[in-house]
Amino acid sequence: MLRLSGLSVALALALVPAPAEALKEGECEVCVNFLGKFYQSLKDNDVKFNSADIEDTLVKSCKDAKGKENRFCYYIGATSDAATKIINEVSKPLSYHVPVEKVCEKLKKKDSQICELKYDKQLDLTTVDLKKLKVKDLKKILEEWGESCKGCAEKSDFIRKITELMPKYAPVAAKARTDL
């Protein structure tokens, strides 16, 4: 009898689901950041907290998303070219005001790629020496600004274009730079 109860206790413990692992610091940074801003915009714009309205607003927000945030939208199915559609895994919990960290934990279980997204390291344009950057990084700066450098063949062309546009897109950095 004692063996039977010990066996049943072991079986019961094996069947109890393990507690969900909380996100570690810096994990799912794109998910947490994007959904945090999105949730705040829902509250600021007095959107009704039901799944359908949240989904519609999320799809609209994703149309304006760029870079890693656009990739996140693709993964959850909020873009027109997305292959999967797990957008309801975002809208339903948000309609119940579930914290975005918990929503991202749940999304991580569905698709681990979501939490592998990380923001690119931002360059400090006030101190960085543009001449020491790679052309790839210079192109990335222009891309973030929504600009391109048509006819740029050499590194110096990209640097000239960035310094020309810096007052428009990074006025603080433009004023702080002394090498202009």
Image (cartoon, helix red, strand yellow):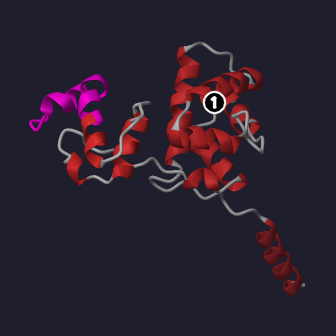
Q: Residue at x 39, y 51 (%)?
A: 136
Task: Please give the residue where the numbered disc 1 appears in the rendered image.
Answer: 97
Three-letter code for the amino acid on which mark 1 is drawn: His
Q: Residue at x 89, y 82 (%)?
A: 4
Image spot of residue 129 (x, y percent): 19, 48
Q: Is residue 21 visible?
A: yes
Front residue of 158/39: it is 158
Residue 71 appears in which quarter of the rendering?
Answer: top right
Q: Quadrant of the N terminus?
A: bottom right
Relative height, residue 12 to residue 156 (above, below): below
Q: Quadrant of the C terminus?
A: top left
Q: Residue at x 54, y 54 (%)?
A: 23
Helix, strand or loop status at disc 1: loop
Image spot of residue 11 (x, y percent): 83, 75
Q: On the rendered structure, is 178 left or right of 133?
A: left
Relative height, residue 76 to residue 37 (above, below): below
Q: Is residue 92 magenta?
A: no
Front residue of 32/62: it is 62
Q: On the rendered structure, is 22 left or right of 175?
A: right
Relative height, residue 9 to residue 109 (above, below): below
Q: Is residue 162 magenta?
A: yes
Q: Is residue 121 visible?
A: no
Residue range highlighted in magenta: 161-180
